[in-house]
Image (cartoon, rainbow, N blue to C red):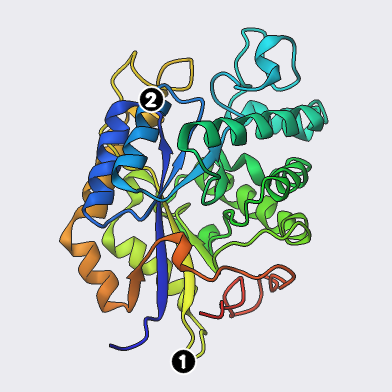
Amino acid sequence: MSRPRMRLVVTADDFGYCPRRDEGIVEAFLAGAVTSVSLLVNGAATESAAELARRHSIPTGLHANLSEGRPVGPARRGASSLLGPEGFFLGKMGFREAVAAGDVDLPQVREELEAQLSCFRELLGRAPTHVDGHQHVHVLPGVCQVFAEALQAYGVRFTRLPLERGVGGCTWLEAPARAFACAVERDARAAVGPFSRHGLRWTDAFVGLSTCGRHMSAHRVSGALARVLEGTLAGHTLTAELMAHPGYPSVPPTGGCGEGPDAFSCSWERLHELRVLTAPRLRAQLAQDGVQLCALDDLDSKRPGEEVPCEATLEPFLEPSLL
């Protein structure tokens, strides 16, 4: 059997958000289309999701949440810079604006992250395989530092670095989505330093900003992975992560993180992702492209201390792993 050009982890985010989303995620995992999940410990279906993860031996990480719903840490007991007047997190853009304005108390971020890590251990009886961030909050300036510190203290080695090659040129993305993706990339690039200094690891490449929701197709996933592979030396096997949000759409009022399900989770696009991921066409295309699906634990991830090349280079954003 020839050596694969790429080993790909397919991660389903928002596990524990609602039973319908979880049903679709488990379906995708059992079909071999998803290889890892990220659990929201403040999700409405967290406990049942943890039971599903144990029953089916699903590699499960923590989807650290600082932007949607209610906290699980000390902030839930009183006033906090992380919360609005009704006791909920500030929202996807509200949290970013508060961080940019310097209105977020980073020690409170650390407390909430530690509480979520502890909650995960209570639910699963072990540490998470990885920790990433709901709505990419983990790469925000300042937040990335306390995030890295918390993971190091809890012995978690793996995270997500949402740097997707060429996403700024993906003209099919609506202008707001493309602007958000580019902002996430800028934050992720700046987070490399703190992540490396605290011994965190990540895959060589990341895909998912350009293939989210209605934009996911076998052709676009294949194209995104092909951009990553450009310039790769023969004989090297890259590691990559595909972020996905599959599932059966939420039906209000069930789901969410304390405020009910949002429009993203209720959208038909969640079912679209599930169908694309589980369809034979994508699996056949990946096999044709020399892409092998695997779990995060099977990878030798990005080594700390290796620099990210500048955008002008034709090399992948991150150096190939030694497999």
Please tell me whether mark 1 or mark 2 is closer to you in this view.
2
| Image position of 28 with respect to 218: above or below | above
Marks 1/2: CA distance? 45 Å
Report which residue position mark 2 lands on: 45
Residue lying furthest left: 280
Residue 133: x %, y % from top left: 57, 42
Report which residue position mark 1 lands on: 234
Q: Going by the image, does 37 lie left or right of 93?
A: left
Residue 293: x %, y % from top left: 34, 66
Q: Which part of the image, by quadrant, shows the N terminus? A: bottom left
**In the foreground, 258 or 299:** 299
Q: Which residue is at a point 72% across and 54% down the rendered structure image?
A: 191
**Mark found first going from the N terminus, 1 or 2:** 2
Q: Which residue is at a point 66% across and 34% down the rendered structure image?
A: 113
Residue 59: x %, y % from top left: 41, 51
Q: Secondary structure at mark 1?
A: loop
Q: Secondary structure at mark 2?
A: loop
Q: Which residue is at a point 46% across and 60% down the rendered structure image?
A: 296
Q: From this viewpoint, is residue 295 visible? A: yes
Q: Going by the image, does 47 lie left or right of 282?
A: right
Q: Are marks 1 and 2 in contact (CB under 8 Å)?
A: no
Dot 1 crowding, Cα within 10 Å, few <14, some 14–19, many 20+: few
| Image position of 60 with respect to 313: above or below | above
What numbered label is drawn on residue 121? none
Q: From this viewpoint, is residue 276 visible? A: no
Q: Going by the image, does 313 lie left or right of 232?
A: right
Dot 2 crowding, Cα within 10 Å, few <14, some 14–19, many 20+: many
Q: Amino acid at mark 2?
A: Ala
